[in-house]
Amino acid sequence: MPPTPHILRIALNGDAPVYRQIVDALRHALVAGDIEPGHILPPVRQLAVDLGVHFNTVAEAYRILAAEGWLDLRRRRGALVLSRKSPAHPDATVSSAFSRRLRELIAELRASGMSPTRIARELRSLAEGLEK
């Protein structure tokens, strides 16, 4: 398995806050199985140095993932990746937030000039990938 920083791609001048980029990248790697249970992520300060960000940025990302049940945080040891089962059914809040975020993303893409046909094609392609 490659070292964790190679999994993370962050844009310091991007639209999304850096801590959110770290959370999203790590969550994606966790869900995809690129980072497996039992793996120890680098300590906060080390990952911050590797990424060129403030340690509080990485700490916030780790706290969010710990709250979601992905990580066990312990001082001076890094973050232990936990085995996490997905809930059988998302609650209504998650479903509502998903729909809202998807609508916002589609509106943002349309506002930047992407055609509805292209958006639909990308969504279908992603949906097909989920069903495999």
Image: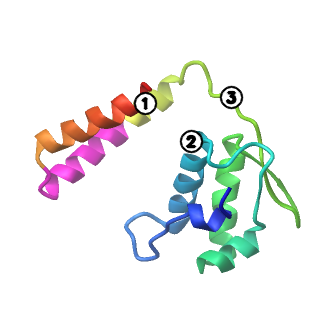
Magenta stretch: includes residue 106: yes
Q: Which residue is mark 1?
A: 130
**Which type of secondary structure does the marked residue at label 1 adopt?**
helix
User: Is label 2 in contact with label 3 (beta carbons under 8 Å)?
Assistant: no
- For the point 21% across and 52% down, the residue is 109
Q: Which residue is mark 3?
A: 85
Q: Quadrant of residue 102?
A: top left
* Residue 107 vertical position relative to residue 15 in the rendered view, above or below: above
Where is residue 17? Give x, y as percent: 48, 66
**Which type of secondary structure does the marked residue at label 3 adopt?**
loop
Badge 3 or badge 1: first in the primary sequence: 3
Q: How many numbered discs?
A: 3
Estimate the spatial distance between the alpha carbons at disc 3 and disc 1, rounded to whole Å.
Answer: 17 Å
Please tell me the numbered disc located at residue 32.
2
Where is residue 13? Give x, y as percent: 41, 76
The part of the chain drawn in magenta is 100-114
Where is residue 129? Give x, y as percent: 39, 33
Looking at the picture, the colour scheme in use is rainbow
